[in-house]
Image: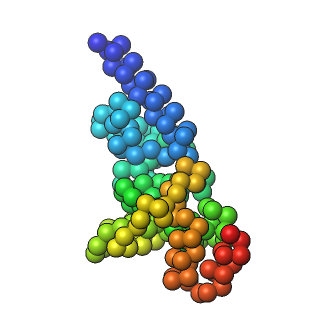
C-alpha cells in the first residue's frame, strides 16, 4: 500500500515537472490536480518549498527565480481564462518596446471590477476578441495591432509611435 502511495507521488511529481518545463516553470493548482496530486500533496510541496506561491492558485515549480516569461505567464494564469498580457508587457514580450516596469499588464474581458492582484496591472474591457490574442513563446498576449491600440489609449503618443515603428 505504501509503495503505491509513493509511486503515485513520484508519478505526479514527474508529470508536474514535465509540465512546468513547458510553461516557463509555472503551474496552476488545476494543472497539479490533473497531474494526479491531491490538495494535501500540493500543501506538502509548498511546505517543503518545492512549490512557491506566485498568485492564488499559481505556483513556481522548483524555481526560486523565474525568467520574465514565467512571471508574465503566471500573471496571465492568475487572471483566469481568456486573459492575455497586454499594453507595455505585451509590447516588451513581442519585441516592440522594452520596459523596466515590474507590474505586469494583463487584459481580461468582463464587466465591473476584478480582484486586485499583487504585481498585476489589470485592465478590464467589455470584450477581448479571440482574434486579438495570440500565443507568443507559450504566453497569451495581445496581437501587435491590439497592443499598439492599447498603448495609444493608455500612454503618451510617443509609446505607440515607437511600437508602431518597431512593428
Q: Is residue 113 left or right of residue 150?
A: left
As drawn, the residue found furthest toward the right would be 165
- Residue 132, how many percent across, how many down? 48, 65
Q: Is residue 103 left or right of residue 166?
A: left
Residue for point 55% across, 38% down: 21
- Residue 60, how many percent across, how many down? 49, 46
Rendered position, 112 above or below 31: below
The quadrant where residue 92 appears: bottom right
In the rendered image, which quarter contains the N terminus?
Answer: top left
As drawn, the residue found furthest toward the front would be 131
Residue for point 60% across, 57% down: 68
Residue 41 appears in view: no
Rendered position, 115 above or below 72: below
Please state which of residues 16 and 85 is positioned toward the viewer in this rendering. 85
Asked which colour scheme the image uses, the reply is rainbow
Residue for point 52% across, 76% down: 150
- Residue 124, how many percent across, how many down? 38, 72
Residue for point 37% across, 22% down: 8
Residue 153 appears in view: yes
Q: Is residue 52 left or right of residue 56?
A: right
The quadrant where residue 161 appears: bottom right
- Residue 27, how many percent across, how many down? 45, 44
Please state which of residues 4 and 134 is positioned toward the viewer in this rendering. 134
Amino acid at each position: 500500500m505504501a509503495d503505491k502511495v509513493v509511486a503515485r507521488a513520484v508519478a505526479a511529481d514527474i508529470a508536474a515537472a514535465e509540465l512546468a518545463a513547458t510553461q516557463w516553470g509555472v503551474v496552476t493548482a488545476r494543472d497539479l490536480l490533473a497531474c494526479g496530486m491531491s490538495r494535501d500533496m500540493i500543501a506538502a510541496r509548498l511546505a517543503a518549498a518545492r512549490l512557491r506561491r506566485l498568485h492564488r492558485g499559481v505556483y513556481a515549480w522548483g524555481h526560486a527565480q523565474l525568467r520574465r516569461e514565467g512571471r508574465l505567464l503566471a500573471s496571465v494564469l492568475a487572471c483566469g481564462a481568456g486573459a492575455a498580457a497586454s499594453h507595455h508587457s505585451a509590447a516588451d514580450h513581442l519585441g516592440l518596446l522594452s520596459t523596466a516596469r515590474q507590474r505586469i499588464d494583463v487584459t481580461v474581458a468582463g464587466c465591473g471590477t476584478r480582484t486586485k492582484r499583487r504585481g498585476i496591472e489589470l485592465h478590464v474591457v467589455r470584450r477581448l476578441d479571440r482574434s486579438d490574442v495570440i500565443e507568443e513563446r507559450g504566453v497569451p498576449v495581445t496581437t501587435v495591432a491590439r497592443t499598439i491600440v492599447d498603448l495609444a489609449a493608455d500612454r503618451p503618443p510617443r509609446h505607440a509611435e515607437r511600437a508602431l515603428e518597431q512593428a
